[in-house]
Amino acid sequence: LLFRLNCGFKDRTCIPINGNEEPFNIRLHLAKDILTIQEQDVICVSGEPFYSSERTVTIRRQTIGGFGLSIKGGAEHKIPVVISKISKEQKGKLSFLVFLINGINVRSYRHEEAVQVLRNAGEEVTLTVSFLKKTPAFLKLPLCEDCTCVPSDQSSGTSSPLCDSGLHLNYHPNNTDSLSCSSWPTSPGLRWEKRWVDLRLIPLLHSRLSQHIPGSDVCRKHAFQVIAVDGVCSGVITCPTAEDCLDWLQAIAANISALTKHNVKKINRNFPVNQQIIYMGWVDEKEQDSGQDRMYSPKFLALKGSSLFKFSAPPVTTWDWTRAEKSYTVYEIMCKVLKDSDLLDKRKHCFSIQTECGEDMFYSVELECELLIWEKAFQMATFLEVERIQCKTYACIMESHLMGLTVDFSMGFVCFDAASKAVLWRYKFSQLKGSSDDGKSKIKFLFQNQDNKAIEAKELEFSNLFAVLHCIHAFFAAKVACLDPMFVESQGAATTAGGVSTLTSLKALHIL
């Protein structure tokens, strides 16, 4: 269904996608943990309706008036076949407001086909009849106590198919009851009211928002949908303006974020300090094969301890964490938020992740605030892991000799002989004035000698070039973060976001 609505809690109009059916009123109610889609309906608020369940009745063809029924509706009108008029002789048996004929499919039978089914029946037929709950909406009846409906023989021929279409089936025109508000059950104690009833409930924990047509980069105009973790979907909700749509998106996203933070806090009680969850949330991943029709697919990312996990669905149990599609070490991957000039298609709010193998992965989120939460969470996760390990050593080759390069949070760069462990040279982070690599295995570092200020070049060869480059970047970023007062103040309290300053150039490192 396609929902057209306004912000707030006014009545909304729900129009099916095919546009062929009559609209009915709906509204959205947003609570902190659930999104409720409601529709307006007429319900019995006191007493027990005697037609609350199905009932089987047998009727006989009368000498005059036949079966004493009039049926209307049908597949050509895209509404059910219903019994709309009842003769007085049959009223005792068929004392229902509206009936469905068992065996006549709502969509497959046209009106005249349903008429022929009954005309060709014998002298006696058995029907299973039940109350059709949605009929007041189809008939567009005024939902009030003193309302009246125009009889079908007085209709202009332009109203609902249920009111003025259909062929009468052997009934006497002066001996029938028309389907009208006055023919509603009048049993003592029954009282009817127009109320909002729940149509669909969407739990917000781990739900995802989507403004885009599934699998594509095409954004719907003023529209979105909410998909629950179990796959239940709200349908496409269309707002009258872009501002209204953004208001709804931000409100729902804020509730999802709050629920996620609360859930993470509870889960972290079961994990050690070095395995705490920093971030959990949905993203859309761009498919590597651009030839596929589906350009994007939903993925669930989680930052936990030293790793970035990629799932097809949110992890619920401890065992789920061992079944991730992929996992990466946070200080050996690089995250970059894409500027407008770097975007690959029509999707906005995108970021890329370059793995330790040099593979580039592209993701998008729905809102700018979600992108900001991810960026800060990744920076925080990287900083906490660098602070925990303090140093990382990689094997390398320099001048045909096997060496080891240690990136140390306190001392900087330390190169030593792999066999003797003798230190060959060391430099602080602030002494690195530049670097370059061949994109395959070699890195050339330019360090400044503290004594004579001369530039000294050191060329090293690694088997895992990108992992080394990303690790060095992570250590530099952590060093810069320590000089950010906002980050230092928030480090102790923040668990899902922080004030880490993003390192964008080696020039920022000269202050170290």
Image (tube, helix red, strand yellow):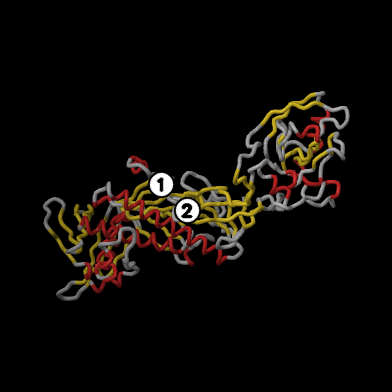
Q: Nearer the viewer, residue 170 or 448?
A: 170
Q: Residues within 10 Å of mark 2 (few under 14, many from 20)?
A: many
Up the image or down, 89 lies above or below 226; here it is above
Q: Is residue 314 visible?
A: yes
Residue 102: x %, y % from top left: 70, 31
Residue 99 in the image: state x and y as whole percent.
71, 37
- Residue position marked by numbered label 1 in the rendering: 314
Between residue 344 and residue 206, name the one nearer to us. 206
- Residue 11, located in which quarter of the rendered image? bottom right
Farthest residue, direction bottom = 452
Compute the Cα span from label 1 to label 2.
14 Å
Indicate left or right for 465 with 95 as reference: left
Residue at image position (79%, 39%) is 85
Q: Residue at x 66, y 52 (%)?
A: 24
Q: Please tell me which residue lies in front, 241 or 499.
A: 241
Report x, y in % for residue 483: 25, 70
Which residue is at 40% across, 54% downward? 259
Mark sitting on residue 284: 2
Q: Nearer the viewer, mark 1 or mark 2?
A: 1
Q: Nearer the viewer, residue 269 or 190?
A: 190
Residue 221 visible at all: no
Mark found first going from the N terminus, 1 or 2: 2
Q: Mark 2 falls on what kind of element?
A: strand
Q: Is residue 281 left or right of residue 43?
A: left
Find numbered disc 1 in the image and state the secondary structure of the residue it sits on: loop
Amino acid tagged 1: Pro
Q: Amino acid at mark 2?
A: Asp
Residue lying at the far front in this picture: please name it.
Answer: 188
Q: Quadrant of the C terminus?
A: bottom left
In the rendered image of this protein, does residue 480 appear above or below residue 363? below
